[in-house]
Image (cartoon, rainbow, N blue to C red):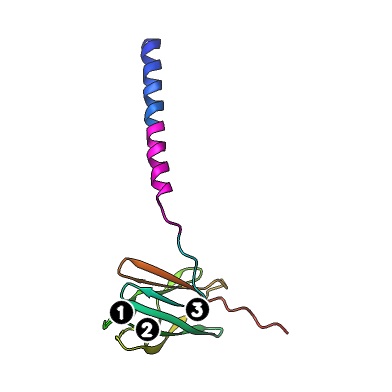
Amino acid sequence: MKTRTLLLLAVTCGLAILLAGGIQLLRVANQQSPAKPLAIGQSAKVGDATVTVDAVDTSDAELTVTIRVSGVDDGNGGAGFTLVTDQPMAPVDNDCTAFTVAERRCQMRFALGATRSQARVLVFSRATELIRWNLNVPAARP
């Protein structure tokens, strides 16, 4: 191959890389940063449901989350709850499966098992929206 051909190929490859980088830069610039997790006691509107995490009770083997839900009649509305620690986990006992328009208080239990992480986040997704609650309760000081 001639030197001129190699130079033209190198310039063409460089322009292609520059164009791809510019497109990726535009994609990243238009992304929204995720909202900060809510604290215990804060409410959020997720899709057509309003959810409030009222309390968290932790034992060695399980974590119980008490919530209030309202705003929509959905027999399977609570299927979108996940606890994220070392790994995501679904509730083992979910009293919050059915949502009603009237406010309803319910509880979910998560088996912690071999989870070693103290970082705990409750995630609820509904209708293309996702909201998170930070469930880390500060330890009592002596």
Nearest to N terminus: mark 1 or mark 2: 2
Type of the residue with mark 3: Leu
> Helix, strand, or loop for circle 2?
strand
Mark 2 to mark 3 CA distance (whole Å)? 24 Å
Residue that label 3 marks: 112
Helix, strand or loop for the magenta stretch, by majority: helix
Q: Which residue is drawn at 37% across and 88% down?
A: 95
Residue that label 2 marks: 69
Q: Which residue is drawn at 66% across and 83% down?
A: 140
Task: Tell me residue 79's x, y (percent).
Answer: 33, 77
Which of the 4 quarters of the picture holds residue 21?
top left
From where the camera sits, is residue 138 visible? yes
Residue that label 1 marks: 77
Task: Tell me residue 42's x, y (percent).
Answer: 48, 78
Type of the residue with mark 2: Val
Mark 3 packing: few (<14 Cα in 10 Å), some, or many (20+)?
some
Q: 135 or 84, which lies in front?
A: 135
Nearest to N terminus: mark 3 or mark 1: 1
